[in-house]
Amino acid sequence: MTFRFRLRCPGTLRAALRHKNRCLRTTLLAPAQAVRSPFRTSPQRRSPKGCLVAATVAATTGMGLHAAAQDGAAAEQMGLEIALEAREKRLGFGNFTARQNMLLRNKRGQESQRELRVKVMEVDGDGDMSLFVFDEPRDVQGTAFLIHAHKDKGDDQWLYLPALKRVKRISSGNRSGSFMGSEFAYEDMSPPEVEKFTYRHLRDEPCGDLTCTVVERTPTDERSGYSRQNVWRDIEERRTWKVEYFDRKGAHLKTLSLDGYQRYLDRYWQAGEMTMVNHLTGKATTLTWTDYEFQTDLNANDFTQTGLRRIR
Amino acid sequence: MTTSPQANGPGAGEAGSALDRFAAVLLDRPWLVVAIAALVMLALSGGAVRIGVTNDHRVLFDEDNPQLLAYDALESTYTESDTALIAVAPSEGSVFSREALGVIESLTESAWQTPYSIRVDSLTNYNHSESSGDDLVVGPLVEDATALDEDALARVKEIALTTPETRGRLVSTDGRVGAVVVTFALPESPDAAVIEITDHLHVVLDEFRSAHPGVSLHVTGDVLMNRAFADATRDDLEKLTPIVFLVILLVTIAILRSLLATVAVVVTLMFTINTTMGFAGWIGTVFNPVNAGVPLIVLTIAVADSIHIVSSTMTALGQGLSKRDAILTSVRENAQPVFLTSVTTAIAFLTLNASEAPPFRVLGNLVAFGVLWALVYSMALLPAVLALLPLRQGRVRADWRFLDRLANFVIARRTTLIFTMGLLTVGLIAGVFRLEFTDNWTKYFDERYEFRRDTDFVAENLTGLESWEYSLESGREGGITDPDYLASVEAFAEWLREQPEVSHVQAFTDIMKRLNMNMHGDEPAQYRLPDNAELAAQYLLLYELSLPFGNDLNDRLDVAKSATRLTAMARGGLTAAEQRNFDLRAQDWLNANAPQLATPATGFTIAFAHLSQRNIESMLQATILAMAGISLILLLVLKSWRLGLVSLVPNYLPAAMSFGVWGYAVGQVGLAGSVMTAIAFGIVVDDTTHFLTKYRRERNAGLAAADAVRATFAETGRALVTTTAILVAGFLVFAASGFEVSWALGALVAITLTLALVADFLLLPPLLMALDRRDR
């Protein structure tokens, strides 16, 4: 167990230090291998009003900031490189399975849960194949959603309906709609294909204990629900910590916060918790990932229409 | 108007001498008085910059208004339902042309750019589903409209006019008008957002209008109504108030026939209004159309006090008194009636605190505050100002001959008058039965506002704008796909569709029926509900996965899939009572046929439908209490049970008669009606008080009833006519407001004041003579 001091203060570090007697909080953090989000403000640890911005001593003393190259082409190049580097770090995982709990909450605080199993398989030279199998709610138990993501065209999507014992193709290639009534669009749930965006590096900034690059990415697909996204990735591991989504009119629509990263096979970082807050409707959805298993005995046949019918 | 304090007995005499000493102090140091008053006024009026204007219709409701709370719960369970509806109407032919559909399609796209928009539903982006081979194809009904061929247009028309989700909602049943509905999530304080949204929409629509002259565009919805709210508030504050001021100025000049005297009145008014509005700012008042009339009402009522004092002064000057003595005389004569009328008026306005609608409480308190300050300034500042002005002896005005003639007529025809006035009263009051209390937000603004014209167009040509919203609970998570639940919702929707009040029903079951048909190869016989909960849930999942951003079902289903939202659009022109009754009938039906779903309707419309009724109930008690209180004050002042009781007749009847007139002439009244009695009563009482005080004095002095009436006419008639003229003129300007609550209130009060004067002249004297004849 390690103990760390975390300082949560408003505004700049100087302000933070001035207020440190008032704002200093000792916080018991989780074991080091589970990395906490710098953006995390869980209710029980929420600092006093006005102290919501987390600033850590480590972030400002430990690491220097990247010299930000902000002029047009250079910024675009840097943004793309960061995206490619992040993809590079994901490559070669083969396949993995995990469980996903989806907690939906509306403005009234009413909650609802969904349980899914997720199987993902890497495809050489193209997007991943993903399979979502629904366990809860009971009425859709055994329903399976298969996606073949593509780099250069719309994704293929199928749904297996156990009550009908039939596979139905979802023709629209839609990725922007609400996934199971949640605040996630399907396109928000997995790392998107690098080719489907243009990039621009905005700045580097401290994020908690780490330093993050902030990259703006603009979808090239006209049917995307977004005009742009801002992505926070730490410099070391290129893990995504936060994504801000801007709707088609450029308004800040949603914010995704990722947390509880764990490393698998000594290499692949996966978030344990993803929370999407819709700023316009006040609704929120939290995805909790558990039981990650990498390099299982899945094979490509499991990700076919025929394979869908065998899913239990 | 010349009640002398000496006549009120020894107590009043002492008060009178104290008053004389007070007045003498004022006249000795007029500059000091003006300076102190100016300090007070300036200190308070500094707050005026803090005055806010809101356009949020919610200000009409109390925070704990049950209908509003239910509506909030609905909105936070599903999605916000603040909307703007844009109607697209080609000047000829149907909307199923390349051009019209093209306009709707690009409007849909532009609508996404509207600030705060969270979804856009239109005839073109409606997500139609059909089967293709073994697959479910979900896509916008129209894509690339301008490239459609005749067959494709015919297909679009066929689908749009047969699908329950579009027909009568996104396209008129005759196919001539199409719609784009934008839904917004407004921030907590929506004022700025509403301005931003509506400005944006108007710019976009104007661009479309100039690019497509063959298509007319109309926009309505509650966001637009909020904008009209703001515009109306500003119009009333900024346009009507100066007009009232001008009217008052002209009337004052006409009555006083002296510019300097008019200056004195205007100075007093300015002090009063600045103090009141400044105070309003300091206490953080936010004005809205309902209480935007505060400055106007205060001006109107305050001017009466000043005019009495100045005109008495002028009369005294005319009788050859020195300026100082003339002012002293005037203060002495007017102190009691001005004090009395100010207090009764203030009490009446304070009863508005019982109102359910917060803006009326603000209105009541601010006017009461203003009236009391008018009293202070008239009794302190005004004499000092008069003392400073080089007032010359005014022309001695001839008495109004017609008052004499009127008095003689009343005395001669007293029996006939009691009879005819009685008949007239009964006849007018009978009109009350034709009166309907209703608040309808679609009719809050008159046709000078584009909002009203557009709203009328949409209501006549496309869809009703008022709706009953139902959140139908299945009782368990995921229960909305239970066959039993679906069957009940379906039955309710069908029942609703049969009701004459309903123009369109948007129900979840329509989606399920369509999906069931799609999953069976679009076989029309399969347009029915799935009979298996799992199948239904899986169809729904498939459909939801197919819907793009901004077209999801999250506004119709709750997160737990335990409840669905059903919207029944009302036909235009229903009254509040009809809307409430319909709600009750629907609840009865639910209780009898689907008790597990039973719920009252909610929504914007139903909240308004309850507004005036709730307000009437709350105001009724308070108004009666205020009337009793004021009548008691009159009894004390008049020191006569008989006169006190007689005073009830001219005090109470005018309001009832005025409602009767309204019943015959207009037929409907909303919020204004519930507060009118309290407001008018406080003012009407003043005339009666003057008349009866004078009459009692003449009788005490030994005059016979008829002679006392003649003397009273001569002494008070002129003042009653002039103050009534000012008040009626002021309230008539108020009636020029384009906001229904304001113009109805202004008109009702003006009618009441006129009828009160008629009652004071034609009914009260005959009654007094009849009563006093029996006495002797």
Image (cartoon, coloured by chain):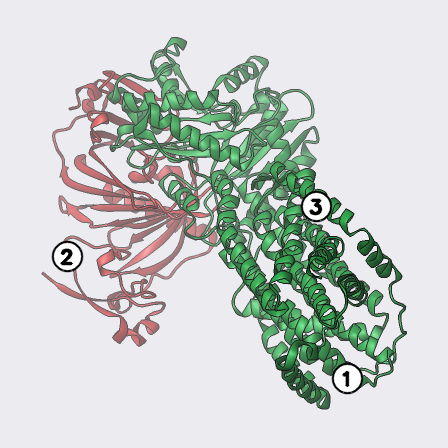
Residue B24, by quadrant, is: bottom right
Cα–Cα gap, marks 2 and 3: 88 Å
Asked whether the residues under marks 2 and 1 belong to the same chain, the reply is: no
Kind of residue at badge 3: Gly
Q: Which residue is mark 2?
A: A30
Question: Picture coordinates of residue B720 (x, y %)?
Answer: 75, 62
Residue A2 visible here: yes
Q: Indicate the quadrant where residue A106 lies.
A: top left
Camera-near label (3 vs 1) is 3
Residue position for label 1:
B387
Name the image quarter holding the N terminus of chain B.
bottom right
Q: Residue reaching furthest left?
A: A1
Packing grade of label 3 (10 A; few <14, some 14-19, many >=20) is few
Q: What kind of element bears circle 2? A: loop
Chain seen in green: B
Q: Position of residue B91 (x, y in %)?
A: 69, 26
Q: Position of residue A285 (x, y in %)?
A: 29, 43
Mark 2 vs 1: CB contact within 8 A: no
Q: Chain of mark 3?
A: B
For chain A, give the colour: red
Q: Amino acid at mark 1?
A: Ala
Helix, strand or loop under label 1? helix
Q: Is residue B464 left or right of residue A69?
A: right
Quarter of the C terminus of chain B within the rendering: bottom right
Q: Residues within 10 Å of mark 2 (few under 14, many from 20)?
A: some
Q: Is residue A23 left or right of residue A225?
A: left
Chain of residue at mark 1: B
User: Mark 3 highlights which residue?
Assistant: B422
Q: Is residue B359 visible?
A: no
Would residue A105 be found to the left or right of residue B619 on screen? left
In the rendered image, residue B68, in percent from the top left (x then y), is placed at 43, 45
